[in-house]
Image (spheres, rainbow, N blue to C red):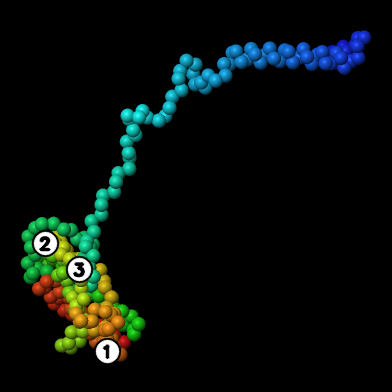
């Protein structure tokens, strides 16, 4: 039987095992010291003899900003009772439009309205000429009028405030359309700008007409509507 696994001698076996443990610990300590000398803890994990590098650029060489500031969007001045056309419109200097080359048309979203429905009204402006021209389409120049027979019932100018001017270039043959505004089915006047003091117009099948204007230019035809 091996004397390594079963030590023999005048002393009890436990004594020999303790001696062997002390020797083994001494050997382990020597090995650790040798490893520490060779490895040198605290040295860079990079290649020997080279300093660690940083991915950050030098302080005087900041990275270029790849994001560009968005250009400020052009916005038309707000209007109270009418709104400037926006789709395809551009402001520029040029030859003023001949009124004879500008065609206006009144636009309604429906022809007949239920008692709780409000007519949505707008206008289109077309350059029927052969050349580009400039026209003021600001809210100061626009006017929408609702009438029945010879009587005017409502006008977008009656209570308009802070009207604006906006010169717009219309290319030859171009048509622009203004955003729609709602008519509350009341009779307007400069003295009744508080909507609570306005009277509702007659309904129950009454017929009204929408006419539109830009300055001295008038729509050739009025758009009819029936209020139920």
Which mark is first along the chain, 1 or 3?
A: 3
Q: Does any portion of residue 226 appear in the rendered image?
A: no
- Residue 191 in the image, given as x and y percentages of width and height: 20, 81
Q: Secondary structure at mark 1?
A: loop
Quick one: 88 or 137, which is closer to the camera? 137
Picture residue at 12% right of the left edge, 69% below the top: 102
Is 76 in front, or is 133?
A: 76
The 10 Å Cα crowd at callout 3, few under 14, some 14 to 19, many 20 or more, is few
Q: Quadrant of residue 83?
A: bottom left
Name the side, left or right, on which 107 lies relative to 116. left
The mark total stands at 3
Q: Is residue 197 above or below residue 9?
A: below
Q: Which residue is tagged 2?
A: 134
Decide if residue 11 is in sight here. Answer: yes
| SS state under label 2 | strand
Q: CA distance from mark 3 to mark 1?
A: 30 Å
Crowd around label 2: few <14 · some 14–19 · many ≥20 (10 Å): many
Q: Please state, as top left, top right, bottom left or bottom right, where the N terminus lies in the image.
A: top right
- Label 3 close to label 2 by CB (< 8 Å): no
Q: Nearer the viewer, mark 3 or mark 1?
A: 3
In the picture provided, is 228 more to the left or to the right than 47?
Answer: left
Q: Are marks 1 and 2 in contact (CB under 8 Å)?
A: no
Vertically, is 41 above or below 82? above
Residue 80 sits in which quadrant? bottom left
The residue that appears at 92% across and 9% down in the rendered structure is: 10
Identify the residue position indicated by label 3 in the image: 162
Residue 226 in picture, x, y percent from top left: 27, 85
Q: Which mark is residue 202?
A: 1
Residue depth check, mark 3 versus mark 2: number of the one nearer the observer: 3
């Amino acid at each position: 039987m091996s004397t390594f696994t079963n030590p023999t001698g005048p002393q009890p076996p436990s004594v020999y095992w303790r001696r062997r443990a002390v020797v083994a610990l001494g050997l382990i300590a020597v090995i650790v010291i040798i490893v520490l000398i060779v490895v040198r803890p605290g040295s860079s994990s990079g290649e020997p003899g080279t300093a660690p590098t940083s991915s950050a650029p030098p302080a005087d060489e900041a990275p270029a900003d790849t994001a560009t500031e968005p250009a400020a969007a052009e916005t038309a001045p707000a209007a109270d009772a009418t709104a400037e056309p926006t789709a395809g419109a551009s402001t520029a200097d040029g030859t003023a439009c001949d009124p004879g080359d500008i065609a206006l048309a009144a636009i309604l979203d429906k022809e007949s309205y239920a008692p709780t429905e409000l007519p949505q009204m707008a206008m289109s402006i077309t350059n029927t000429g052969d050349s580009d021209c400039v026209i003021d389409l600001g809210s100061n120049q626009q006017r929408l009028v609702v009438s029945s027979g010879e009587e005017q019932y409502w006008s977008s100018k009656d209570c308009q405030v802070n009207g604006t001017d906006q010169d717009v270039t219309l290319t030859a043959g171009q048509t622009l359309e203004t955003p729609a505004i709602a008519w509350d089915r009341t009779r307007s006047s400069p003295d009744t700008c508080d909507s609570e003091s306005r009277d509702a117009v007659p309904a129950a099948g009454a017929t009204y007409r929408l006419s539109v204007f830009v300055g001295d230019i008038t729509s050739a035809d009025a758009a009819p509507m029936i209020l139920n």
